[in-house]
Amino acid sequence: MNYGYEGKVILPVPLEVPATAKPGDQAKLSAAVDYLVCAEVCVPGTATVALSVPGRRRVPAPDPIGGPQIAAALASAPKPSGLTARFQATGSKLTLAIVGAPLTGAVARDAYFYPYSETLIDHGKPETVDRGPRGLTLAMTAGSAFAKGSAAATAAGVLAVDGKAYEVTATPGPAPEGAGGLGPPAAAAGAAASLALALGGAFLGGLILNLMPCVFPILSMKAAALAGHAGEAARARAQALAFLGGVLASFLGLAVAWRPRGPPARRWAGGSSCSRRPPWRCSGW
């Protein structure tokens, strides 16, 4: 399992100006960049970049193009958050419980923990979330750091929750109060929202379909036939229910026969697969 970025990525790197620098000197900055670009396959690349920056007496104004982009990257970068975190390892299961003001009442539709250590968890296994009133608890598969009776002293990394990121350092111990117990309602809410969207789309599609020239005359004919039984309420009701039942049965039959499987996961070299949401989490590179 490797972790990757999608689209344009800015990775700010701090630079230290030598104390011997003087105004008018040219600072030569250079870097060797190794990268991996993945779509259907992964292609490695390398580049050497260089830039000369003149020394000045005063701090210059930020670059009009790159300055705001770098400022935004710095603002969104993970920072110490003051969150309280505890972890427990039981067999192959590792739980990480986190509480604090930034997580109080969090929806946690998309929560993921990116550990700094490669051996802390099994990166290829899923992470499940249990919400709490003051935070959340993630259940993961323990990595080799807990193999054969050994135990990690800390669990440090980045917690990403609903588009925000926090630096977290957890110590061994029981879960703090309020870190769980509410279950994963975010998933249920997402499913309910998807169902509501599907029903709304079906209703709109039905309205559009009924206005088609091949359908609208049939509806008018059916309405006229029902109107012909105006004096026979029971017979008109039976025909209306039969018409409704026939429509529902036909479309339910089509739905069962179609059985959509949803969009495929992103495929990568070596037969690996990636998550469908950025930042892409890919296995088998």
Image: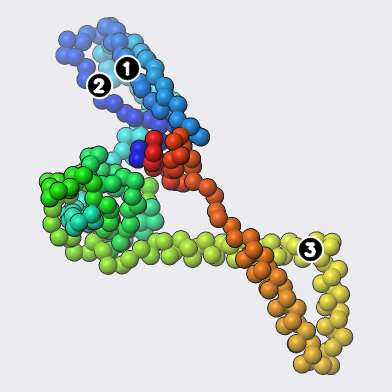
Task: State the CA–CA distance, disc 2 to disc 3.
Answer: 65 Å
| Left or right side of 156 for 283 | right
Q: Circle 2: is it few (<14), some (14-19), or many (20+) Cα within 10 Å? A: few
Q: How many numbered circles are shown?
A: 3
Residue name at image x 46 percent, y 37 percent: 268
Q: Position of residue 177 (x, y in %)?
A: 18, 64
Q: Position of residue 2 (x, y in %)?
A: 35, 38
Q: Amino acid at mark 1?
A: Ala
For marks 2 and 3, the one nearer the N-term is 2
On the image, which quarter does residue 58 sit in? top left
Q: Amino acid at mark 2?
A: Leu
Q: Which mark is residue 211?
A: 3
Residue behind mark 2 = 15
Residue behind mark 1 = 31
For marks 2 and 1, the one nearer the N-term is 2
Q: Circle 3: is it few (<14), some (14-19), or many (20+) Cα within 10 Å? A: few
Query: For this rendering, which residue is in front, 17 or 263?
Result: 263
